[in-house]
Image (cartoon, rainbow, N blue to C red):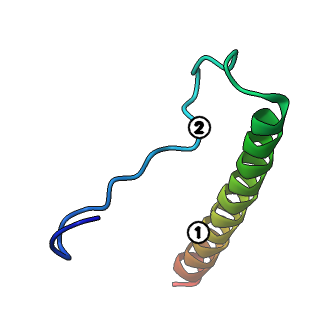
Amino acid sequence: MALFDDEPLSTIPVHVLGQDLSELSVDDLEERIGQLRLEIERLTEALAAKGSSRQAAEAFFRRV
């Protein structure tokens, strides 16, 4: 817990790319897969939103 509001909260990543997975149980692996799938969905939605913004900007500047 941070002592002051402006101190960043320490976060422990759920998964680190390339980490050793041999110590994880089947349940742990399934949990990580589920979390990573949710993250992929979130990233895909962010990408689509940025693509829509870009298309709108390109359409605007083509008209001018």
Label 1 and label 2: CA atoms lie apart by 31 Å
Tell me: residue 40, above or below residue 47: above
Whole-percent x and y of residue 13?
A: 50, 44
As drawn, 29 above or below 58: above
Q: Secondary structure at mark 2?
A: loop
Eye-nearest disc, 1 or 2: 2
- Front-most of residues 58 and 5: 5
Q: Which residue is mark 1?
A: 54
Q: Work out whether mark 1 precedes mark 2 in sequence or the reverse, and give the earlier one.
A: 2
Amino acid type of the residue tagged 2 in the rendering:
His
**Which residue, given by chain and number where applicable, does mark 2 sit on?**
15
Residue 19 screen position, x and y as percent: 57, 21
Question: Quarter-wise, where is residue 63 in the image?
Answer: bottom right
- Few, some or many C-alpha atoms within 10 Å of disc 1 (few <14, some 14-19, many ≥20)? few
Nearer-the-camera pick, 25 or 35: 25
Residue visible at 61% across and 17% down in the picture: 20
Q: Secondary structure at mark 1?
A: helix
Residue 46 lies, in percent from the top left, at 63, 65
Rendered view: 26 above or below 14: above
Q: Is residue 59 above or below residue 38?
A: below
**Kind of residue at disc 1:** Arg
**Within-10-Å neighbours for mark 2: few <14, some 14–19, many 20+:** few
The image quarter containing residue 45 is bottom right
